Amino acid sequence: MTTVDLPLLPLGRGVDRASERGVECPGDLPQASDPDLVARALAAKEALGERVFVLGHHYQRDEVIQFADVTGDSFKLARDAAARPEAEFIVFCGVHFMAESADILTGPGQQVVLPDLAAGCSMADMARLPQVEAAWQAMADAGLQDVVVPVTYMNSSADIKAFCGRNGGVVCTSSNAEVALEWAFEQRGPDTKVLFLPDQHLGRNTAVLKMGYTLDDCVVWNPHLPGGGVSVEALREAKVILWKGHCSVHGRFSTKVVDELRATLPDVQILVHPECPHDVVLSADLVGSTEFIIKTIEAAPPGSVWAIGTELNLVQRLARAHPDKTIVFLDKNVCYCSTMNRIDLPHFVWAMESLVAGVVVNRIEVDPATERDALVALQRMLDLPGKSHKD
Ligand code: SF4
């Protein structure tokens, strides 16, 4: 089997609204040095009133999060937008796959705007539909397609969610990944296998740490290698086929820094997101979603000491909000999510002022067929028993 060669789309070249990359910002972007940007954003928001609803992901910069009507994780924000049908415009301060999910879950009268089209997600980019379809075909060739259930993390493009919808699979968040995997393993009898997309770490951490599978039960499918780099025998024996994708932010955390922090801050508690590598999660005291991290810090006693392994904007915001606790970042280097950070005040002002002027810029619109199939996979997630759906 050959691999699928896909063109790389460098940032800032041409306009491609269907892609998470390769886009320029059309129109007149205000200068970042403009001292009136905050006043301009406020004025635009006031002029639009109930017609606009601004969503701010937890990993966004303070300079834009201050204008958010609600903050949260990607799935909560998409649902919040759906619960505000009177809002004609949803301005999503987050990344491309999140805006797609908001478009899928909101009504036909609502238009979703992403202030910078280059705000993609490197993890979502690691699983592209032709690659996943090639892997699916390879599994069919190995006689396994009837027993493989695809499960995709919320952090994936709409066409990957649609692929799961079409093929008996489901979407999950980092809060309900365990329930989603349990559901998936019930779908094809005792021989069921799960293809987990696109984050190998969340898939591995869930399967091994929550569900009792072993590392040997997991194989990693590398779309850049023939046959995924997995022998047919290994594929047949595996229970979990992990897509070789990861978050470029959470993938940076290391046990070396965990050890150093434990040596220098003896009372430190290590709190990490399940997108971190398996050894980091194993070395942590607590692991959970962004909402779990926020709630854990809110409930922590004064004087407690925390090192947090998640996106830096959120860690810094938590540290400022809880001056009675010691909160440090679980990395020696500054590491923001570079694509999240593309949504800055100039882009926000530009998007909002354009709406005031009657021009909808950077609309994210999922095509009807993809939306229909993605909704199937999202609805299966909503129908899962028990746990919340926050990521
Ligand atoms: S933090 Fe990671 S998963 Fe989230 S948008 Fe950035 S690269 Fe993607």
Image (tube, grey):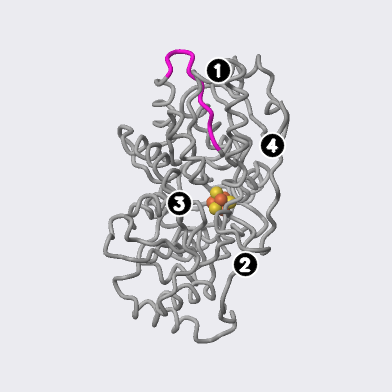
- Identify the residue at horizontal 37%, vertical 51% (top origin): 76
Q: Pointer 1 and pointer 3: residues touching (CB < 8 Å)?
A: no
- Identify the residue at horizontal 53%, vertical 86% (top origin): 35
Q: Position of residue 3 (x, y in %)?
A: 71, 33
- The CA distance from mark 2 to mark 4 is 27 Å
- The CA distance from mark 3 to mark 4 is 24 Å
Quadrant where the N terminus sits is top right
- Of callouts 1 and 3, which one flags the residue occurring earlier in the amino acid sequence? 1
- The CA distance from mark 3 to mark 2 is 20 Å
Where on the picture, by quarter, is residue 373?
top left
- Of callouts 3 and 2, which one flags the residue occurring earlier in the amino acid sequence? 2
Q: Is residue 223 above or below residue 339?
A: above
The secondary element bearing badge 4 is classed as: loop
**Residue at mark 2:** 24
The secondary element bearing badge 3 is classed as: loop
- Of callouts 2 and 1, which one flags the residue occurring earlier in the amino acid sequence? 2
Disc on res. 4: 4
Q: Amino acid at mark 2?
A: Glu
Q: Nearer the viewer, mark 1 or mark 3?
A: 3
> In this rendering, would 76 be left or right of 123?
left
- The CA distance from mark 1 to mark 3 is 31 Å
The residue at label 3 has a CB less than 8 Å from ligand 1: no
**Residue at mark 3:** 366
Q: Position of residue 390 (x, y in %)?
A: 39, 46
**Residue at mark 1:** 144
- The CA distance from mark 2 to mark 1 is 42 Å
Q: Position of residue 83 (x, y in %)?
A: 28, 56
Q: Amino acid at mark 3?
A: Val
Front residue of 182/125: it is 125
Report the magenta residues as a range.
Answer: 188-197
